[in-house]
């Protein structure tokens, strides 16, 4: 039976380091950990922390970190032209800017609350360490993947049209 996950700062940092190690070892091709990668994550995390966690517990933590990282990167990329607070690892915005942003971002009528508000005082913990294990998680990378897909479809469409033109 799995232990209850304790995600204190030390355990999160260790989990990030283990993820980086498995990525470097080639156990996350195409953005997803292999069976060996997950086995190594579980084993190495247990060796360091003493917690016997399931793949599902580790994946939930990784997914939650990706979600928070994505929200932060969306916010950071949206908030261009503002300052950066190195100590807090977040965008330096005035109260007026926040009020205006939250007024646009929130939609109480639809039950939507702006995810960026959590970064008002502090960015995600371990931000500098999250870029490698969570690369491909932010919307810019998804957009690039989408553009590659569009290019592929466009290439085959042109090929088909040329083929049909030569046959006709």
Image: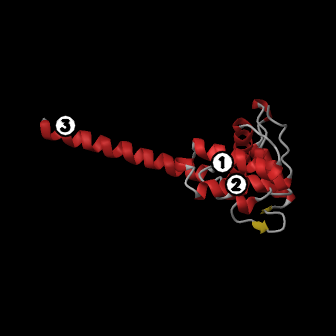
Task: Report the residue at 69% width, 40% height from top.
Answer: 59
Given this view, does label 1 or label 3 mark the residue nearer the observer?
A: 1
Q: Do tag 2 and tag 3 residues touch (Cβ < 8 Å)?
A: no
Mark 3 and mark 1 in contact (Cβ < 8 Å)? Answer: no
Q: Earlier in the sequence, mark 1 or mark 3?
A: 1
> Can you tell which mark lies on residue 18?
2
Is there CB contact under 8 Å for labels 2 and 1?
A: yes
Point 60% across, 55% down: residue = 23
Quadrant, the C terminus:
top left
Residue 36 is left or right of residue 13, and the answer is: left
* Residue 64 placement, left or right of 28: right
Quick one: quadrant of the N terminus? Answer: top right
Whether residue 33 is visible: no
User: SS at mark 1?
Assistant: helix
Residue 56 is left or right of residue 159, and the answer is: right
The answer to whether residue 53 is seen in the rendering is yes
- The crowding category of the residue bearing disc 3, from other C-alpha atoms within 10 Å (few below 14, some 14 to 19, many at least 20), is few
In this orientation, which residue lies closer to the viewer: 68 or 93?
A: 68
SS type, badge 2: helix
Q: Point out residue 123 in the picture as x, y percentages from the top left corner.
A: 80, 57
Residue that numbered label 3 is attached to: 164
Give the quadrant of residue 133. Answer: bottom right
Q: Looking at the picture, tell me which residue is in the foreground, 89 or 74.
A: 89
- Type of colouring: secondary structure
Residue at point 80%, 56% (across, down): 125
Q: Position of residue 78 (x, y in %)?
A: 68, 55
From the image, tell me which residue sits under label 1. 40
């Amino acid at each position: 039976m799995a232990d209850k996950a304790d995600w204190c700062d030390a355990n999160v940092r260790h989990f990030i380091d283990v993820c980086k190690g498995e990525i470097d070892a080639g156990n996350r091709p195409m953005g997803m950990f292999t069976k060996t990668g997950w086995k190594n994550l579980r084993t190495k995390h247990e060796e360091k922390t003493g917690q016997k966690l399931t793949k599902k517990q580790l994946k939930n933590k990784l997914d939650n970190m990706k979600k928070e990282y994505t929200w932060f990167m969306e916010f950071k990329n949206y908030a261009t032209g503002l300052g950066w607070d190195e100590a807090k690892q977040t965008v330096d915005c005035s109260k007026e800017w926040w009020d205006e942003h939250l007024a646009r971002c929130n939609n109480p009528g639809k039950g939507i609350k702006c995810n960026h508000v959590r970064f008002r005082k502090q960015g995600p913990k371990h931000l500098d360490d999250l870029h490698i294990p969570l690369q491909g998680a932010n919307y810019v990378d998804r957009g690039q993947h989408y553009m590659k897909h569009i290019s592929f479809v466009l290439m085959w469409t042109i090929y088909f049209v040329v083929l049909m033109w030569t046959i006709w």
